[in-house]
Amino acid sequence: MPVGHRDGHLQAAWETEPKDGGVRQYNSRQPAPAFQLLAVHLHPLTIHLFYCLTMLWTLNFAVAQWTPLPALPAGDSLADKIVVLTGANSGIGLAAAHTLAARGPAKLVLACRNMSTGAEALAAILKAYPRIDAVVWELDLADFASIRAFGERAAKELPRVDSAVLNAG
Ligand SMILES: NC(=O)c1ccc[n+]([C@@H]2O[C@H](COP(=O)([O-])OP(=O)(O)OC[C@H]3O[C@@H](n4cnc5c(N)ncnc54)[C@H](OP(=O)(O)O)[C@@H]3O)[C@@H](O)[C@H]2O)c1
């Protein structure tokens, strides 16, 4: 679909090129069929409706950002549970790690690609919840060898996995 500008007008050839080898060209005074179709459908009312919907979506998004999340059910316990959480060193994963740690799991495995920020996350969690058994293990989900090594380690060192929160990536 050759597209170009000539004399300040957008030219687009949507169709097959003419048999004489030249390129079929259109401009704003003689729009391409696709533009003609668009012009029929873009009635001013349609544009207003589209504008209103966009504004509503934006408003809804803004309100959602400032609305506090509902409190998690009190008393939920992860005692005796072994939990694995991927991408636990930052963002939602880090917040989830604190939420899980607060529920006292038997073991919390923070699976992280970046071991240095993973260690920082672990230190913060152990400082806030010193009684839980939390560890940081290396896992790069973009590296199959790393995934295998993680799986083998889990099979060797964990009696089972009760919950896996696959947040990374
Ligand atoms: N934030 C949002 O508004 C939102 C909305 C919908 C869905 N989500 C989903 O929620 C999840 C977390 O979002 P987020 O905003 O917290 O993202 P983020 O801040 O980018 O954190 C992503 C986490 O995943 C890790 N990660 C990325 N690629 C990885 C890989 N190949 N192997 C191992 N770990 C990897 C990152 O580790 P590094 O620190 O090493 O990069 C980081 O810990 C994502 O799956 C995202 O798609 C987020």
Image (tube, grey):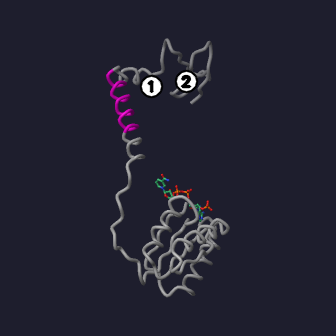
Asked if residue 33 lies left or right of residue 123, the reply is left
Question: Mark on residue 113?
Answer: none
- Main SS of residues in magenta: helix
Camera-side residue of 25 and 78: 78
State which quadrant residue 153 falls in: bottom right
Residue 46 painted magenta: yes
Residue 158 painted magenta: no
Q: Which structural element holds mark 2?
A: strand
Residue occupying the point 38% across, 43% down: 63
Quadrant for ligand 1 reads bottom right
Percent position (x, y) of residue 67?
37, 48
| Residue highlighted by disc 1 | 34
Residue occupying the point 49% across, 67% down: 98
Tag 1 or tag 2, which sits nearer the N-term?
Answer: 2
Residue occupying the point 54% across, 58% down: 91
- The answer to whether mark 2 is within 8 Å of ligand 1 is no
Camera-side residue of 45 and 120: 120
| Residue highlighted by disc 2 | 12
The residues colored magenta run 45-59
Asked if residue 15 lies left or right of residue 75, the reply is right
Residue occupying the point 42% across, 20% down: 36
The relative height of residue 2 versus residue 29 in the rendered view (above or below) is below
The answer to whether the residues at label 2 and label 1 have Cβ atoms under 8 Å apart is: yes
Camera-side residue of 165 and 144: 165
Percent position (x, y) of residue 81?
43, 81
Q: Amino acid at mark 2?
A: Ala
Percent position (x, y) of residue 18?
56, 23
Percent position (x, y) of residue 3?
59, 26
Q: Which structural element holds mark 1?
A: helix
